[in-house]
Amino acid sequence: MEREHFSRQYDAELKNIREKLLEMGGKVELMINDSLKALVERDSTLADRVIAYDHEINRLEILIDEKCLEVLALRQPAARDLRFITLALKIVTDLERIGDQCRNIGKRVKELNDEPVLKPYIDLPRMATWAGVMVKEALDAFVRGDDQLALKVCRDDSFVDALNEQIQRELLTFMIEDSSTISRSMKINNISKCLERIADHATNVAEMVIFMVNGKDIRHTEV
Amino acid sequence: MEREHFSRQYDAELKNIREKLLEMGGKVELMINDSLKALVERDSTLADRVIAYDHEINRLEILIDEKCLEVLALRQPAARDLRFITLALKIVTDLERIGDQCRNIGKRVKELNDEPVLKPYIDLPRMATWAGVMVKEALDAFVRGDDQLALKVCRDDSFVDALNEQIQRELLTFMIEDSSTISRSMKINNISKCLERIADHATNVAEMVIFMVNGKDIRHTEV
């Protein structure tokens, strides 16, 4: 009876960590979307909200870290659960840094909104959509232990990289043709890099998931 | 007697993790220095060596991760040791990403070495020196549990940020005055950002150390 109670509570704790991670993931996804919406719609109030929202992500990071430490200290998990908890600890750091990137995007958006539009944004929102989906799928892969989905995330990263390179080439042309676009181009370039880094974080998470599922490290091999 | 043997072995395992982390830290420090040396001395062979060396950093990441998991599974550490191990798991990720940044610098250096020199590099090597010292001190703070040293690292980050901003302003002037410098300026800008990110990783490590020592989270408060 005692034992069963322990086990039920332990399961609930693991479930809670899983849920909190998904909640945190959902919130950074929202930040990614909102930061780009603020850019496309030139909405500096929304950009301010994204910047302020980073606090919520930081709060969740501390909370989940503490929960993981508690489970490690009190439950002494083994095998699969141990791997799950230690990965949760790493993943939470990636999510927090995605939040930081969204805050950076928010800041650049506000600066860009004070200047005339350089060009309609087509590729950046596409990149943001890809990156957001990658974050979602990487976390889904984690909580479900789905290595196939994780592998898809790793592969999708190349699309984001390609978009980033395309945007950079385009901006280079702008800058060379008209020096009055340089300052704005640099800011757009910065946003593109932030999105690329967000996709990198998602890829890191996905690689760790594949490791968790297969006990095989693909982090530093080609996929 | 049995117990004493267990304890000696356990201590040796913790010591080994500490040493491997310092070894990894020393190696990324070397990568930082070499990548900048390759830039200043226009040495593409050295840049290639930095790029190839990233494999060694990745190998150490996997090794240390495994050692930490082993200790967690077999020794069920509590309190201080538990915090040490879980932080080691996070820190190793930061070190690995510093290696990635050095590899990125190496790639940009090779591209820059194929073009005429834009200007003598003064601030970038200074930035690299700061960043390298920050990485070293953050790790020293970790293994010694020295929160004062960690606090210094957090404060030093503002110097690197200031240098990065100064470099970016200077490059903007170059680009606006002479469009033939744009492509090279963008690459130098990229290197500056890589160094800034390296310093950010060191700061992240330092913040976690302060948390470990004081049980208080300063990650998301002002220092």
Image (cartoon, coloured by chain):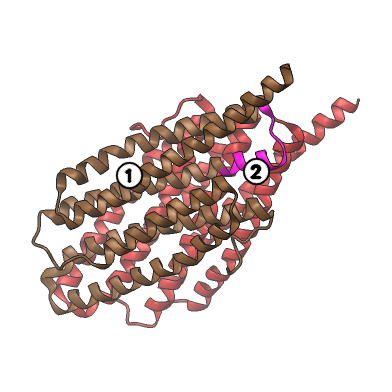
Chain colours: A red, B brown
* Residue shown at 61% from the left, 66% from the top: B221
Q: Where does the image place residue A160, in percent across and percent down from the top left?
A: 35, 50
What SS does tag 2 mark? helix
Q: Residues at badges 2 and 1 in contact (C-beta under 8 Å)?
A: no
Q: Which mark is residue A158?
A: 1
Left or right, residue A55 beside residue A150: right
Q: Find the residue positioned furthest to the left.
A: B116
Magenta stretch, main secondary structure class: helix
Q: Chain of mark 2?
A: B
Foreground residue, B26 or A17?
B26
Q: Chain of mark 1?
A: A
Q: Which residues are drawn in magenta?
A: B75-87
Compared with residue B86, is residue A161 higher up or lower down, i.e. above or below? below
Q: Which mark is residue B138?
A: none
Q: Where does the image place residue B89, in percent across and percent down from the top left?
A: 54, 40
Q: Find the residue positioned furthest to the top.
A: B2
Identify the residue position indicated by label 2 in the image.
Answer: B83
Q: Is residue A78 visible?
A: no
The C terminus of chain B sits in image quarter: bottom right
* Residue shown at 21% from the left, 60% from the top: A169
Q: Where does the image place residue B17, in percent across and percent down from the top left?
A: 53, 34
Circle 1 crowding by C-alpha within 10 Å: few under 14, some 14–19, many from 20: some
Foreground residue, B83 or A8?
B83
What SS does tag 1 mark? helix
Three-letter amino acid code at disc 2? Arg
Q: Where does the image place residue B167, in percent across and percent down from the top left?
A: 28, 71
Between label 2 and label 1, give the one nearer the viewer: 2
Specify whether disc 2 shares its chain with disc 1: no
* Residue shown at 60% from the left, 63% from the top: B220
